[in-house]
Image: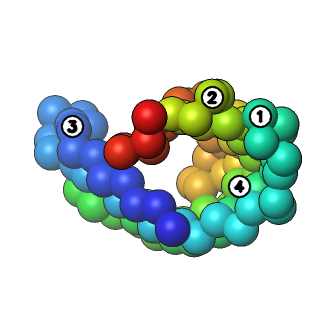
Amino acid sequence: MSGLGTLGTTGGRTAGRGEIALHVAAPAKPNAWGWFLGGGVAALVGPRSAGFVLATVGAERGVGRKGVVWLEGGVAGGPRVVIGYRVHPGRR
């Protein structure tokens, strides 16, 4: 499960976006690429408030013991492409 919140401006007025998603991953061998699917909801709050269904598909790969790199594409009120890296706290 993942969540995201952002705050900014649009047209000179304050606006925000929030997302919550559940991801289901296929098991992958260590240091090999594995795929995942995700779905959830996203919402815009501000001058143009709206709600969206979020759908995503991606691939991730462990990098050593400390982190994971991932690529993701999908939709949530428009197209989305994500490239990211996350660190596993406490792993050495």
Instruction: Give the residue drawn at x 15%, y 45%.
Output: 14
Q: Secondary structure at mark 1?
A: loop
- In this rendering, is residue 38 above or below 66? below
Marks 4 and 1, the one that precedes in the sequence: 1
Instruction: Give the residue drawn at x 75%, y 62%.
Output: 25
Q: Secondary structure at mark 2?
A: loop
Marks 2 and 3, the one that precedes in the sequence: 3
| Quarter containing the C terminus | top left
Q: Is residue 81 visible to us here?
A: no
For disc 3, the marked residue is 9
Query: Disc 2 marks which amino acid?
Result: Gly
For disc 2, the marked residue is 64
Instruction: Give the residue drawn at x 67%, y 36%.
Output: 62
Whole-angstrom CA distance, mark 4 to mark 2, is 25 Å
Closer mark to the observer between disc 4 and disc 1: 1
Q: 28 and 85: which one is in front?
A: 28
For disc 4, the marked residue is 56
Task: Give the x, y percent position of residue 90.
Answer: 36, 45
Task: Report if the CB atoms under discs 3 and 4 are less than 8 Å apart.
Answer: no
Query: Disc 1 marks which amino acid?
Result: Asn
Marks 3 and 4, the one that precedes in the sequence: 3
